[in-house]
Amino acid sequence: MQYRSFGKLAWQPSALGFGCMRLPTIEGDAARIDKPRATKMLRYAIDHGVNYLDTAWPYHRQASEPFIGEVLQAGYREKVKLATKLPSWLIKEPSDFDRYLDQQLERLQTDHIDFYLLHALQEDWWHKLRDMNIFAPAERALADGRIRHLGFSFHDEFKVFQEIVDGYDNWDFCQIQYNYMDVDYQAGRRGLHYAAERGLAVVIMEGLRGGSLAQNPPPAPIAQLWAESERDWKPAEWGLQWLWDQPEVSLVLSGMSTLQHVEENVTSAGRSSTGALTDEELALVKRVHKVFRQLAPIPCTNCQYCLPCPNGVNIPRVFAIYNEAQMYQDLAGARNAYQWLPKENRAHNCVECGECEPKCPQQIEIIEWLKKADALLSA
Ligand SMILES: NC(=O)c1ccc[n+]([C@@H]2O[C@H](COP(=O)([O-])OP(=O)(O)OC[C@H]3O[C@@H](n4cnc5c(N)ncnc54)[C@H](OP(=O)(O)O)[C@@H]3O)[C@@H](O)[C@H]2O)c1
């Protein structure tokens, strides 16, 4: 295993962290973790040097935390740093902080959480937590040792990320979605650098875009590109090594769902380092990015000239989800993403008023594509 630096802390994380959100389950039921298999995977990872586990209140319909508590018995708790998260969307008043944290400590069978995050901050939840001064109970928990470090995970635009980083002086770390397709999405590369320059450790989630970048074999034009390299890396390893190449990345979480994923990713992490990819290899990854984009059927560039839609449809977001279904051949993932889009922003709200189409610089037939997208994604 390779170890890296973690912001301003003296501690060194393993290059690979274990994301406990996609553990193997029984009969596809997220709430029923296949405990023997998952235990084997987690203990294999820890026995091979992984020292950071990431879970959260809602993962596996709240079964992840209690299960991780069980796995970390028999001496395993002492071998890892444990991260879990305050469910931001459920917090109504400052006293909720202790209510959730104390239950999480019980579920996890531990007296402290090493890394505690405000979960999935986006603008509204950030403002709610900031305005109720959630930092007061958080600082009490830091002082009495129930949590050791405070951070946040993030899903919104860069300007919100900046506001959060600058909005509190004592963040130790943050967690962002980042991979070679999402360089300019959400916090993106700008966010990675912004946080790292201010001394925050940056934990990466969705490094393989939830598995979209790990398909083996990938779509034919992508497979052709990878074959140009002399490296015998599988697509998953390309995605991970591209992240580890960057010194601002503190550690990469992977939500591994089989023992084979764990074995492969542990091996990849063992041969990772910063600055390892050549200029040609970095250029190859950029070409892969570009060709993935070309697989998108709707030529939307997210310029947002079509907005606001008088009926509330988030046209660029609907198109992005539709495109992703095709680019990554992942209809289930796209349908899931569509469910996360607020109902009032979905394509079925289009009344064909046509206000958007003349504004589109790409001359996209927006009305027709919205119909197609809704039919596919809401099925
Ligand atoms: N805080 C937040 O808001 C938030 C949001 C998302 C995630 N997270 C955390 O971040 C963690 C990482 O994100 P993620 O789970 O989306 O990670 P990811 O690494 O982008 O995706 C994990 C998926 O990639 C595939 N995979 C991994 N290793 C592979 C390999 N060697 N070969 C082939 N496929 C491989 C698997 O897909 P298949 O199972 O389809 O084979 C696996 O389920 C999560 O587990 C969770 O702990 C946090």
Image: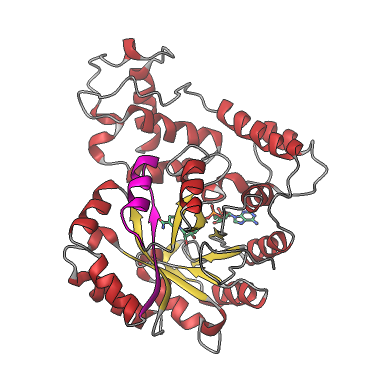
The picture quadrant where one finds residue 141 is: bottom left
Colouring: secondary structure
Span highlighted in magenta in the image: 146-169
The picture quadrant where one finds residue 304 is: top left
In this rendering, the answer to whether 79 lies above or below 88 is below
The residue nearer to you, when weighing 175 against 240, is 175
Q: Residue 168: x percent and y percent? A: 32, 58
| Residue 282 within the segment the image draws in magenta | no
Q: Residue at x 36, y 40 (%)?
A: 159
Q: Residue 311: x percent and y percent? A: 20, 26
Q: Residue at x 51, y 80 (%)?
A: 71
Q: Residue at x 22, y 21 (%)?
A: 351
Number of numbered labels in the structure image: 0
Q: Residue 294: x percent and y percent? A: 58, 25
The residue nearer to you, when weighing 23 against 46, is 46
The residue nearer to you, when weighing 3 against 45, is 3
In this rendering, the answer to whether 327 lies above or below 297 is below
Q: Residue furthest top?
A: 358
Question: Which quadrant does the C terminus fall into?
Answer: top left
In this rendering, the answer to whether 377 lies above or below 1 is above
The residue nearer to you, when weighing 158 against 8, is 8
The answer to whether residue 229 shows anywhere in this view is yes
The answer to whether residue 375 shows anywhere in this view is no
Question: Which quadrant does the N terminus fall into?
Answer: bottom right
| Residue 154 within the segment the image draws in magenta | yes
Q: Is residue 40 left or right of residue 32?
A: right
Q: Residue furthest right?
A: 230
Q: Residue 157: x percent and y percent? A: 37, 41
